[in-house]
Image: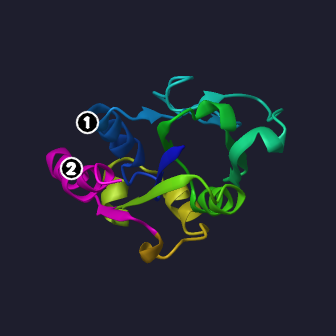
């Protein structure tokens, strides 16, 4: 099993990078489960599976985390071969500890706070991100600073991620 993980703050472009990697590299994006309510414009089964409560036994989970007062998880059977998983830092650490034999390619996508505000991220979400347990950038296999255009981001994904993924 090979898993590409994408981590970063709200509004940095994690889902955009995941979709680019899916489109360019043919990787499946895992749709995680969450107990948080849908945000405007989100579609159940696309961004997340939105559920009222977590009723999956932890031994059936690939990863689980609580963030912002809500639960997020994915099940082991959602990953069959190569996949992309957008996950927070605590979930990524737990995944690494629980499944040391899974081949991971870890990506951090980040952006300046001013950029994230321009993208419509609320101050509340920015403040909540301050509580995250950040990992050193050296922990990741690729770091993408996403403060520019969509074209610039696509170029970074191709140069910093796809070329490395093709070697493994």
x and y, in percent, of residue 141 in the image:
39, 65
Residues shaded magenta: 140-168
The residue depicted at 68 percent of the width and 38 percent of the height is 76
Left or right of 165 on screen, residue 80: right
Residue 7 appears in view: no
Mark 1, other Cα within 10 Å: few <14 / some 14–19 / many ≥20: few
Helix, strand or loop status at disc 2: helix
Q: Residue placed farthest to the top in the image?
A: 44
- Residue 116 falls in which quadrant of the image? bottom left
Q: Is residue 167 magenta?
A: yes
Task: Give whichever of 135, 75 is nearer the camera.
Answer: 75
Q: Earlier in the sequence, mark 1 or mark 2?
A: 1
Query: Mark 1 sits on what residue?
Result: 24
**Image quarter hosting the N terminus:** top right
In this view, the residue in front, 17 or 125, is 17
Q: Quadrant of residue 94?
A: bottom right
| Residue ID at (36%, 53%) | 168
Q: Residue 68 vs residue 2: left or right?
A: right
The residue beneath circle 2 is 158
Q: Position of residue 129 (x, y in %)?
A: 54, 62
Q: Which mark is residue 73?
A: none
As displayed, is residue 109 above or below residue 78? below
Whether residue 75 is visible here, answered yes or no, is: yes
- Dot 2 surroundings within 10 Å: few (below 14), some, or many (20 or more)? some
Q: Secondary structure at mark 1?
A: helix
Determine the CA span between mark 1 and mark 2.
Answer: 8 Å
């Amino acid at each position: 099993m090979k898993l590409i993980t994408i981590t970063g703050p709200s509004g940095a472009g994690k889902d955009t990078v995941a979709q680019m990697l899916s489109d360019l590299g043919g990787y499946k994006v895992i749709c995680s489960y969450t107990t948080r309510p849908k945000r405007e414009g989100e579609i159940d089964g696309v961004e997340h599976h939105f559920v009222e409560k977590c009723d999956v036994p932890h031994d059936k989970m690939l990863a689980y985390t609580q963030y912002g007062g809500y639960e997020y998880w994915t099940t082991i059977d959602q990953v069959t071969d190569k996949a992309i998983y957008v996950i927070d830092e605590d979930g990524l650490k737990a995944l690494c500890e629980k499944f040391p034999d899974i081949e991971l390619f870890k990506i951090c996508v980040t952006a300046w706070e001013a950029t994230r505000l321009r993208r419509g991220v609320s101050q509340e979400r920015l403040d909540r991100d301050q509580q995250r347990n950040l990992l050193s950038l050296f922990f990741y296999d690729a770091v993408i600073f996403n403060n520019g255009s969509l074209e610039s981001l696509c170029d970074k994904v191709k140069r910093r991620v796809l070329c490395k993924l093709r070697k493994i």
